[in-house]
Image: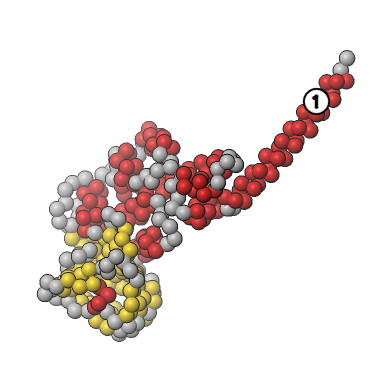
Amino acid sequence: MTNIQIRRTDGSIAALNTLVNGSSSPTKLVEGIGFVQRFEVAAGETSEIIRLEHHLTLNHKGNFKLTSTHEGRRQGDRQVGAGHIHFRPALMPHSSTWDGETAFTVIALNPAFVQTCATDLFKRDLSVVTFRPMIAEQDSLCWELGSRLELAAYGEGQLPRVFVEEVATVLAMHLLLKYGNAVPKNAVSHATLTETKLKQLYNFIEDRICEDIGLSELASLSGLSKYHFCRQFKQLVGLTPHQYIIHRRIEVAKRFLAKPELTIGAVSECLGFASHSQFTAFFRKYTGVTPQVFRQRLELYQKKDFSERAQLSIGISKISSRQP
């Protein structure tokens, strides 16, 4: 996988990590959404560049002064520390100078993905959606959503598609609503998720519980934008779509684990988990025990139940034999 690509204002293409004095991890592709990449850099500067994607930066460490220029306008000096975020829109000429070492993660969102989210949210074709840059801000929602995408990219095993789409969509919507320019906020749809539609969604999920269900499929069935679907589903059900699907998979897994002919690996694979360890982690999170412990306890319970039923049967037989 190549590094995140940027374009210098002279038209040449370069990898982002060639512009800074430090190291970077390989770029992690988030299919259909963008990229994630981690950096550790010393004090330095970049030439004026144009980012090909919208870049959300999560600053993990450091305490340094950052000077930024966007479209030739100096943004002023900002003191940056762990927990600060930056957002730099695609195709906006930008340069930076910083006087201390730092480590950060770049969440690069494909403009086409953000455009689709904008059209989906506002129910109209928005050919141009512009953003204003933000530097050294504290935005807890951006940080949380960006961190979840980082986990999806670098964590062990592939997370369910609905989880990644859910997080990326809410992040894009948040950026649109909070940092977008000329966005018609009064055009947002106010349609609601009805009980009838909710029942249809439940049935749809049950029928495809072993498949990698996408957020787009669920939102389309509900008749809502992905953003409004996520919010209303959480309000009605108490869980996000991703959490609900995992919850239902765990309930099905409990039934499968009661069948001794099925190995735990087979149960994990059947229910679409990326790995045995991922299945174990989710199962423990939702039940408090591992699949192996759950199966052992289930076997003990079944043996105890069989023994009690056998003793009851013997007792009934004795009583019956005494009757005239």
Q: Residue furthest top?
A: 324
Residue at x-position 27% and y-position 79%: 20
Q: Is residue 271 left or right of residue 52?
A: right
Residue 114 image point, x, y percent = 24, 56
Report the colour scheme: secondary structure
The residue labelled by disc 1 is: 316
Nearer-the-camera pick, 38 or 64: 38
Q: Nearer the viewer, residue 31 or 146?
A: 31
Q: Dot 1: within a 10 Å radius of its alpha carbon, few (fewer than 14), some, or many (20 or more) residues? A: few
How far across and how far down the image is residue 203, in percent?
41, 35
How far across and how far down the image is residue 189, in percent?
26, 44
Q: Is residue 219 above or below residue 203?
A: below
Q: Residue at x 71, y 36 (%)?
A: 306
Amino acid residing under circle 1: Ile
* Placement of the N terminus among the 4 image quadrants: bottom left
Q: Residue furthest front?
A: 261
Task: Please tell me whether residue 117 is drawn above or below residue 7 in the rendered image.
Answer: above
Give whichever of 110, 188 is nearer the camera.
110
Q: Please, what secondary structure does the residue beneath circle 1 have? A: helix
Residue located 42% across and 62% down the image: 155
Disc tally is 1
Q: Residue reaching furthest left?
A: 10
Identify the image quadrant of residue 53. bottom left
Asked whether, in this view, residue 177 is left or right of residue 38, the answer is left
Q: Which corner quadrant of the image does residue 47 belong to?
A: bottom left
Q: Quadrant of the C terminus?
A: top right
Say which residue appears at 24% left-offset and 78% top-offset: 19
Rendering coords of residue 72 (x, y %) = 14, 75
